[in-house]
Image (cartoon, rainbow, N blue to C red):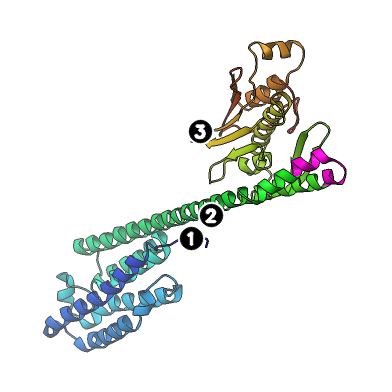
Amino acid sequence: MARRERVMRMSVELPLWRALTAYRVLTMVYAIGLFATAYDEFARPWPAVGYFAVLAAWTLLTLPRVANAAACTKRFLAADLVVALTGILLTPVADSAERIEAGGPTLPSIWTAGSVLAFAIKGGWRWAALASTLVAVANLVERGTAARDTVHNVILVWVASIAIGYVVEVARASERTLARALEIEAATRERERLARDIHDSVLQVLAMVQRRGAVIGGEAAELGRMAGEQEVALRTLVSGGLVPVSRVSEDVAEGAVVRAVDEPESDDPGAPVDLRALLAPCAGSRVSLAEPGAPVELAPAAAREVAAAVGAALDNVRAHAGDEARAWILVEDEPDEVIVTVRDDGPGIPEGRLAEAEGEGRLGVALSIRGRLRDLGGSAELISVPGQGTEVELKVPKNTPGTAVPGGRPGERGSR
């Protein structure tokens, strides 16, 4: 039975909401206790008693509202802030002017900070800045002057709430990045498992039908051609469903396979292209493709030219190493460049053969491979040892605009 994969997600906000819930309850108890100990000092305590009754009921009844971001709506935040501001502005009505001038606390006291923190956790530092500014204005109106202790408390709440809001925004971005990475990792593992299973069964059968059909000829050749189409389409699917194969044709007489691929459609023609999508159809029964699990993005023209250079290298393998030669394509996504290596197990290139071919006007390696990479600001290095195969290493920088190569179309092929 196939192993089931599950991506677990942990919300970094959940502990903050739990802490806020406890903070609101504790600060409500603190504010009521502070009032109770100084009850006799209030000039008109009954407005304060009424306010604290509302504050206690509001705090306890709205605990589910501060349990998570979904429940903490904008309407609730606005009402919660109104409760805090009302308590601040009601302080001169209940308390004496002497106590206020002496630095006495407002009625809600530090409970007000909980309301501001809810804005910070819900909407980030911008929401926190708005709420803390309104609280600052209410405190200055309540005190009647910008006393030193009032300004100190205002700045403390303002800075703390904005800092917490910013941390929440960064945490959310990190959580999204982590979740995406976990999804890619899980999808890659599942894709590799499917590729192993399919390669050991279906793909081998399709490859055998393709080869046998080409040998037998007649109607069997058509059956082999159709099996070849399905093999390439299935390889593309198990490699990630990167791009649909538009057409696959086989010239049985020449023994060469030509694959054409429709590029992924995009609303933005200048949007980066995933190089894996263009190289996926190159994979076959004798061509193995190893690629990263994440997209390898290049400018559209640059990606097409690299894919064309890889195609030219594979054509050289088929033309000079024989139909039975195997080839391997390795794609490496480095921070500043993309490296694609094409290696085969053919007889290799005799020393001096490339220079001789260029002298004869056969410029396959010079133009189809090296020329393309040079025009992109990259390089192509060919290493060949007679009897040990050939390796072509293509390097293209990521910051290259990827303009089209003059004198060649993507998909042109040459020979060594």
In the image, what residue type sits under mark 1?
Glu
Q: Which picture quadrant has residue 401?
A: top right
Q: Amino acid at mark 3?
A: Asp
Q: What's drawn in magenta, residue-wise?
A: 210-222
Q: Nearer the viewer, residue 47 or 371?
A: 371
Residue 344 in picture, x, y percent from top left: 62, 28
Q: Which residue is mark 3?
A: 336
Determine the residue positioned at 39% across, 63% down. Answer: 10
**Magenta segment: does it hold 274?**
no
Q: Relative to the observer, which residue lies in front, 70 or 261?
A: 261
**Residue, disc 2:** 190
For mark 1, what is the residue?
A: 5
Looking at marks 1 and 3 on the same chain, the residue that comes earlier in the sequence is marked by 1
Residue positioned most to the right: 218
Residue under the image location 51 percent in, 52 percent down:
189
**Mark 1 vs mark 2: which is more N-terminal?**
1
